[in-house]
């Protein structure tokens, strides 16, 4: 399993989500575990400019988890989780 870091903004969102929507929280945590255990993180979607250094994965059809993989240190940085329109809008 890879090392990972969760940005403060996402940590705040996770705390809110834990109290408001436990099912979506569990789906998100399962997806984060899947990303960390994945043999090839590069198969996740790369974003376009100005977020070209980030990757995304859809969760529960309308929501997106944004993260960055650093292959030199084999580390994943989770940045944001929000509705698709707010992330890309």
Image (cartoon, rainbow, N blue to C red):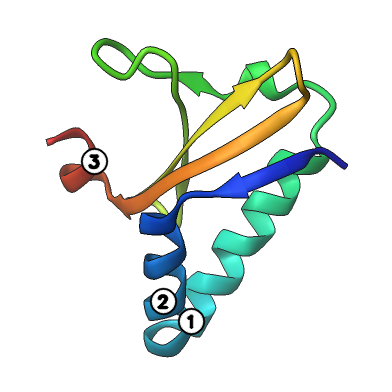
Could you give the CA–CA distance between mark 3 and mark 1, rounded to whole angstroms? 20 Å
Q: Residues within 10 Å of mark 2 (few under 14, many from 20)?
A: some
Q: Where is residue 39 in the image (x, y as percent from the top left)?
A: 84, 26
* Tag 2–tag 1 contact (CB < 8 Å): yes
Q: Position of residue 38 (x, y in %)?
A: 80, 34
The residue furthest left is 89
Q: How crowded is mark 3: few (under 14 residues within 10 Å), some or many (20 or more)?
A: few
Which residue is labeled 2 in the image? 17
Sequence-earlier tag: 3 or 1: 1
Name the residue located 49 percent from the left edge and 21 percent from the top edge.
45
* Tag 3–tag 1 contact (CB < 8 Å): no
Secondary structure of residue under mark 3: helix
53, 29: nearer the viewer: 53
Secondary structure of residue under mark 2: helix
Secondary structure of residue under mark 1: helix
Name the residue located 73 percent from the left edge and 46 percent from the top edge.
34
Sequence-earlier tag: 2 or 3: 2
Q: Check the picture and name the quadrant holding the C terminus.
A: top left
Which residue is labeled 3 in the image? 87
Where residue 82 sits, quadrant-wise, is bottom left
Could you give the CA–CA distance between mark 2 and mark 3, rounded to whole angstroms? 17 Å
Which residue is labeled 1 in the image? 18
Q: Is residue 7 visible?
A: yes
């Amino acid at each position: 399993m890879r090392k990972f870091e969760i940005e403060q903004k996402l940590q705040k969102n996770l705390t809110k989500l834990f109290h408001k929507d436990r099912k979506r929280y569990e789906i998100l945590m399962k997806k984060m575990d899947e990303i960390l255990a994945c043999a090839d993180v590069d198969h996740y979607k790369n974003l376009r400019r100005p977020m070209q250094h980030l990757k995304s994965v859809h969760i529960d059809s309308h929501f997106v988890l944004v993260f960055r993989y650093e292959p030199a240190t084999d580390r994943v940085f989770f940045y944001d989780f929000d509705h698709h329109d707010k992330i890309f809008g």
